[in-house]
Image (cartoon, helix red, strand yellow):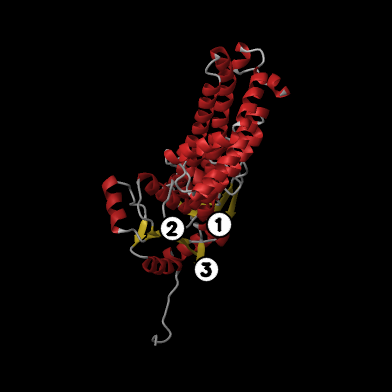
Amino acid sequence: MAKRDSMPTSIETKRNEEPSELLRELVAHLRQNRTQLREEWVVRITETRLLTAMTKEEIFAEATSVYDSYVEALETEAFEALQAYARNLSERIIPRGVETHEVVGIVLLLRDVLARSLFAKYQNDFKKLNRILDAYEPAANRIANTVAVGFVQERERVIRQQQEAIRELSTPVLQVRERLLILPIIGVIDPQRARQLTEQLLRGIRTNRAKVVVIDITGVAAMDVTVANHLVQTVEASRLLGATVIVTGLSPEIAQTLVTIGVDLGKMNTVGDLQGGIEQAERLLGYKVETLAEPR
Amino acid sequence: MEVPILKQGAVLIATFQAALSDADLNQLRMGLVQQVVKFRSRAVIVDVTAMDVMDSFASRTLREIALMIRLRGAETVIVGIHPEVAFAMVQLGLTLEGVATALDLEEGLAYLNEKFKTTN
């Protein structure tokens, strides 16, 4: 409880001489009524239809450990431990499809349940109730905050990780002939990915000493102005390195979008499909492909 | 710092050293435009491999060099633009339109040889 001194910001210190004393009393109360309060909390969780992705037993097990961590955080004010716990909890429940509003919801429910039990206990001593609440509420708010932030951070971390994985998977620059590269683009292109694609392609042009690049966008579902402009930039940057770009696989929908929004693709060399693109690239490079025998 | 202009057969080669001031660029422009006729050169190669930054002035000067050289009856090839520089340039809208480019000096010479062959 020595930590109290290092937290001068809380309001209750101004209004109250011995908040740590009150908190201790509070914690003792919560420990004493652990079973009953936890039970009540779980009932409230089920009533409000939170955590529907989890079974009753799971909810009860999680509720128990959350309750204990909650009381412990109230007692020790060691929010780092709670933060670590929240992250750990999020790591377990995010794959189960638990949403942010549910996590925030259950923590607020617990705060509510505990506050009600405090009202019930001190209803005859209004002054004491006030002081207890002064001690309890800032701490409870901080806990709710910590858990919610921990959950969101963990989620963001997971999303970042997945984005990274997708990005690494999805940008192959392939050499199909001496000085001829293919860049097949699949999926959605956002500005960040477009940038990465361009950088990778330019590096590929340099290391493979490519003269012609075929960018195949058969796998791109939609294209807006930003992405189209990125494509134009990629073509121009490749030209600065001395490489010609052929774009293939523009779908009718994309062609229509581009015409409608008026993106200037006039500088671009486009061919209907990948095969046509490679054939034209071979012509540019001076290759001549001949069949040696009739295929059987 | 003056940029040396090398004569290699029918081609003039100017190699940019690191960062050049605007005055250096102007001097280079005048030097190339004068010498291309003096040596009866058919083409000019400007090698910018050493430039890891290309500002709008440098980019504009390169383009002007190319256009002036064309008016003097020869062709210009810009070689050695770094991938990062190329990306930065197109984002700034500096695309060196109408100017031939090649990966490096070797590619530039190969491109010109090919061109000389067909026009001879």
Does the rendering let one see residue A203? Answer: yes
The quadrant of the image that shows the N terminus of chain A is top right
Question: In this rendering, is residue A294 above or below A69?
Answer: below
Other-residue count near label 1 (Cα within 10 Å), few / some / many at <14 / 14–19 / ≥20? many
Residue A202 placed where, x, y %? 52, 54
Labelled pair 1, 3 in contact (Cβ < 8 Å): no
Q: Earlier in the sequence, mark 1 or mark 3?
A: 3
Measuring from the top left, give residue A35's x and y in whole percent: 58, 37
Task: Please give the chain letter of the residue carrying mark 3.
Answer: A
Q: Which residue is mark 3?
A: A178
Q: Which mark sits nearer the N-terminus, 1 or 2?
A: 2
Which residue sits furthest right? A2
The secondary structure type at the circle numbered 1 is helix
Q: Nearer the viewer, residue A10 or A275?
A: A10
- The chain letter for the residue carrying disc 2 is A
Q: Which residue is mark 2?
A: A185
| Relative vertical location of residue A17 with respect to residue A272 in this rendering, above or below | above
Q: Residue at x 50, y 26 (%)?
A: A116
- Mark 3, residues whose alpha carbon is within 10 Å: few (<14), some, or many (≥20)? few
Q: Amino acid at mark 1?
A: Arg
Left or right placement of residue A120 versus residue A289 in this view: right
Q: Position of residue B44 (x, y in %)?
A: 51, 52
Residue in the picture at 54% in, 31% down: A144
Q: Amino acid at mark 2?
A: Ile
In the rendered structure, the answer to whether residue A90 lies left or right of residue A222 reads right
Residue appearing at x 52%, y 68% in the figure: A178
State the separation of the CA atoms marked 1 and 2.
Answer: 20 Å
Residue A195 vertical placement versus A132 (above, below): below
